[in-house]
């Protein structure tokens, strides 16, 4: 009996030793061991999309753009009002120098972009507004006088002309080629320190309701844009023009990482019209509109807040003659969907005066098409911009 007990003890000891060795070196063999929680990671395939190569330097793009960006300097004479006390000889003796009625000169600075080799330059309207003298400093250091070919206050764009040939003109990017997250460079003359290049990304597209211009469709970027950059170039990483720098969002007047540029699609359209005819012609139908809030959409029994509410119709205007009534919801223009009042303004402005247009409206929960003859939009001055953003 003792012999069998000794054999059992030895077998058990050997078995435990084997289990210890397996647990130490091959734990996966033991099925009774608790399984670790699994983690599944979705790995993108190599061909699933375009990958961005690391940017080593923006120098090639900057070298391509810098010769086509100019500095714009303006002078404006402002007359001081004649003070009644200046008529008093005694008062003039003591205070005449302080109340001098002679005109004073106010200078302004900005930037511009050469758009053609024969001397056309694109800039902001507020840079050259009411200027008595305009000087343009080229990248080679030469300074030449410039004249205003035409301006469009509603987009804050202007075209200048200098007497020069064989200038280094900028290359325009394809319209709507820009995407949020793309690298961009801002080139201009901030604070008058000289030509400067800053880099950033596109933060947003299609910014509206900023209170800067009548027609707004801004590119928002975090590339540093400061006073003096107005009218300068916003280019992609290949050095192609994607926008014209126009304004900054700032409490102090300096860059805080939010700048706005007019997209090249709008800038080119306005520029070509100004060069061709000296002004910009836009469509007009004579309506006053407002955005649809969710509450308004619910009150009109609409499924969504898309469209624009017709708040007023000019008597005798194109819309009035075509049957548009206050309270209508304008849903589309020639089949193009209206998302809000800003998109409606752009769609109407793009129409050719004298042409016929089809307006799709909702009235009493019914959709109908109205045909109108487009009129020509009267020239309107832009309203004073809000404190923020600021024109720079």
Image (cartoon, rainbow, N blue to C red):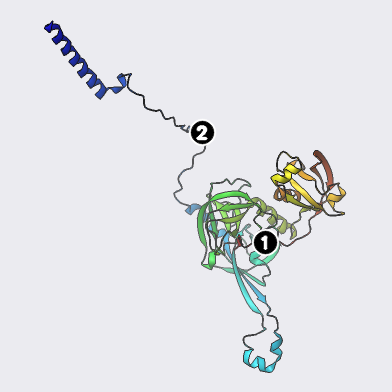
Checking the image for residue 158, the label placed there is: 1
- Residue drawn at point x = 65 percent, y = 85 percent: 100
- Residue drawn at point x = 61 percent, y = 56 percent: 244
Quarter of the rendering containing residue 297: top right
Local SS, label 2: loop
Residue pointed to by mark 2: 48
Above or below, 306 relative to 254 = above
Relative to 71, is 345 on the left or the right?
right
Judge whether residue 265 can be spotted in this image. yes
Nearer to us in this view, 236 or 224: 224
Judge whether residue 161 can be spotted in this image. no
- Give the label, 2 or 1, closer to the camera: 2
The first of marks 2 and 1 along the sequence is 2
Nearer to us in this view, 213 or 103: 213
- Residue drawn at point x = 23 percent, y = 21 percent: 20
Is there CB contact under 8 Å for labels 2 and 1? no
Q: Bin the neighbour count of mark 1 within 10 Å (Cα to Cα): few under 14, some 14-19, many 20 and up.
A: many
Q: How far across and down, in percent of the image, does residue 13 sit?
A: 18, 16
Local SS, label 1: strand
Hey, which residue is sitting farthest left in the picture? 2
Relative to 357, is 108 on the left or the right?
left
Q: CA distance from mark 2 to mark 1?
A: 44 Å
Q: How far across and down, in percent of the image, does residue 49 sit?
A: 52, 36
């Amino acid at each position: 009996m003792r012999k069998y007990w000794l054999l059992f003890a030895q077998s058990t000891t050997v078995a435990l030793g084997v289990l210890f060795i397996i647990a130490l070196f091959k734990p996966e063999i033991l099925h009774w061991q608790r399984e670790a929680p699994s983690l599944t990671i979705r790995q993108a395939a190599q061909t699933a999309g375009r990958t961005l190569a690391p940017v080593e330097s923006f120098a090639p793009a900057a070298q391509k753009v810098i010769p086509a960006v100019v500095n714009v300097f303006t002078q404006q004479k402002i007359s001081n009002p004649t003070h009644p006390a200046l008529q008093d000889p005694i008062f003039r003796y003591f205070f005449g120098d302080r109340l001098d009625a002679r005109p004073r000169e106010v200078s302004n600075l900005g930037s511009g972009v050469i758009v053609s080799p024969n001397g056309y330059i694109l800039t902001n309207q507020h840079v050259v507004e009411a200027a008595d003298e305009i000087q343009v400093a080229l990248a080679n250091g030469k300074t030449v006088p410039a004249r205003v070919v035409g301006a469009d206050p509603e987009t804050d764009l202007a075209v200048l002309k200098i007497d020069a040939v064989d200038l280094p003109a900028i290359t325009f990017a394809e319209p709507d080629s820009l995407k949020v997250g793309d690298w961009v460079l801002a080139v201009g003359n901030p604070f008058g320190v000289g030509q400067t290049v800053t880099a950033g990304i596109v933060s947003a597209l299609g910014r509206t309701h900023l209170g800067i211009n009548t027609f707004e469709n801004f590119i928002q970027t975090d590339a540093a844009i400061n006073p003096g950059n107005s009218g300068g170039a916003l280019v992609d990483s290949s050095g192609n023009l994607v926008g014209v720098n126009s304004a900054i969002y700032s409490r102090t007047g300096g860059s805080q990482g939010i700048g706005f540029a007019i997209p090249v699609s709008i800038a080119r359209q306005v520029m070509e019209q100004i060069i061709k005819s000296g002004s910009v012609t836009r469509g007009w139908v004579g309506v006053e509109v407002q955005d649809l809030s969710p509450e308004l959409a619910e009150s009109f029994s609409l499924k969504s807040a898309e469209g624009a509410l017709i708040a007023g119709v000019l008597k005798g205007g194109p819309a009035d003659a075509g049957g548009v009534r206050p309270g209508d919801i304008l849903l589309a223009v020639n089949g193009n969907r209206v998302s809000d009042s800003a998109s409606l303004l752009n769609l109407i402005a793009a129409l050719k005066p004298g042409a016929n247009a089809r307006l799709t409206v909702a009235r009493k929960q019914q959709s109908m098409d109205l045909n109108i003859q487009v009129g020509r939009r009267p020239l309107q001055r832009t309203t004073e911009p809000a404190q923020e953003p600021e024109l720079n």
